[in-house]
Amino acid sequence: MSELFLGIDFSTQSLTGIIIDYRLKQVIFREHINYGHDLSLYRFKNGIIVDENSQQVHSNPLMWIEALELFFQKLLFSGINIKCIKAISGSAQQHGTVYLNDKFEEKIKNLGPNASLVDQLKNSFTRETSPIWMDSSTTKQCKEIREKLGGKRKVIILTGSDTFERFSGPQIRKFYQQYPQKYENTKIIHLISSFLASILTGKKAPIDYGDGAGMNLMNIKQKIWDENALNATAPNLKEKLPPLTESFKIIGNISQYFIKKYKFSPETKIIAWSGDNPNSLIGTGLIKKGRFAFSLGTSDTYFGYLQKLQFDMEGEGHIFGAPTGDYMSLICFKNGSLAREKIKDDYDLTWEEFSNILNKTPPGNYGRIMLPYFYPEIVPIVLQPKVYRFGFDENEMEANIRAIIEAQFLSMRLHSNWIVEKPNKIYATGGASANKEILQIAADIFKTPIIKFEITDSAALGAAFRATYSYYINQNSNIKWEGLIDSFMEEQKQEKINPDLTNGPLYDDMIQIYDKFEKFVLKNGANPEIYRKEFIRKYY
């Protein structure tokens, strides 16, 4: 009988489910559900609720519940032998929080198969919408927590990251301050990942170390809830949080609701869920020193495997627990695909036309530099969006197209210098990874080979890998991460994009000028125009 493993990813805009056959080393099922298109009640743009005046960005947790139900309905009629699914794990966008009343645990324990999940759980919330990672409305709370914990340096060493607007702790503090009675009535505060895992098991699910590290609440060294961080955030918070656990922990069997309604085996194991970034680490095969990845999606992330704990004392990067039991570094840039698409759409181009123009313009863009803050930025912190252009204006199409791509990867390299372990190869995933011209610029700027993956659903695949590993390790198998993942990766189509090392000196100089312009705009530094003109004379 086949041994199948299911990974489910709840991203910002969609759900993706992947089933792998461990013996065949193949993905045998893949399903996507777009929240805005496929769900009847949540036709928000891209599945999010945006209040631009307050920089608040939320989603409706009922939307995730309905998406989960729709996914299982599709799976039921897919022809897959559901009883062969040995284990399920999941992934969800990090940092988002779900606020539940004292009825939730009883409801998930006694779900009836004749009614939908939404109908049975719709009155379980003390907060009707959930703040997600795109929310940047908690600057006040970040400052308060940072000061209570003794400053940025102490917060970073304690939790692995500075306080960030999108992180769970500041969001919880804001809820407590704005709605103290609703906070008091809240029995459980889940992350999105542990919330969905709870529904699958029919009981309160723990938060894994990887997702827990994105809250500003977990002691990154000891991997426990930190009392000082909890007290700096909100009263009685520890009693409202689930416990923490290892990423490969079996947290229970699937609940009777899914056994009766969707024909799962009663022995199907549920593995602790995690965040999308730790899952993508596994899904892209980042299990060895020197392996890093770009995820070029709604936001762009640069992340990699770390053998040893280290910190970004500037407070821009993050350290999370990795599903392997080690650590991972991550830097998130909010102006990712949305910024690229803004430039493309402004000039009414197709992506093919966009790529052709990239090929026509030279490396360094004749010294024309952009700081592309189309939206509030996370790294570096930019709360008021504005696009800065030096040496050109918005009417120069070719200059703008080259400038946006060079700016994104110059910024990525500049702000990742704190990572001691340097890449010997970088894997590229996400929608923009399909564009070879973009990846060539990235390879040249990083002076590192880029491996283009056919896999675009790395978080869901990582969750499926985690389900597989956890199932067998708990069966006392001698399974190894390398053997599991590398055997799958060998079956995937890959394309290597080598850097043009003759462009190395140019980009080494350009990154210094880019750094000066950042400081000029964001920190009232000296005007670096003289250096930009020297760069032009040197290379053009």
Image: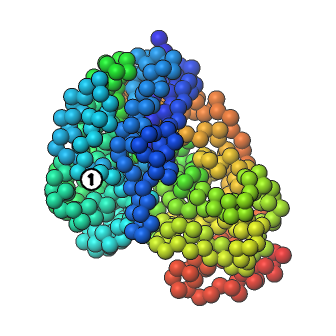
Q: Is residue 499 left or right of residue 283?
A: right
Q: Residue at x 64, y 41 (%)?
A: 453
Residue found at the far top of this picture: 1
Q: Residue at x 28, y 41 (%)?
A: 122
Query: Which is nearer the eye, 413 or 365?
Result: 365
Q: Is residue 228 left or right of residue 462?
A: left
Dividing the picture into quadrants, the one containing residue 496 is top right
Q: Position of residue 418 (x, y in %)?
A: 51, 65
Query: Which is nearer the eye, 250 or 433?
Result: 433
Q: Position of residue 275 (x, y in %)?
A: 41, 46
Q: Measured along the vertical axis of the image, is residue 426 above or below residue 344?
A: above
Q: Position of residue 181 (x, y in %)?
A: 16, 59
Identified by mark 1, the residue type is Arg
Label 1's element?
Answer: loop
Q: Residue at x 55, y 54 (%)?
A: 298
CA neighbours of label 1 inside 10 A, class few (<14), some (14 to 19), many (20+): some
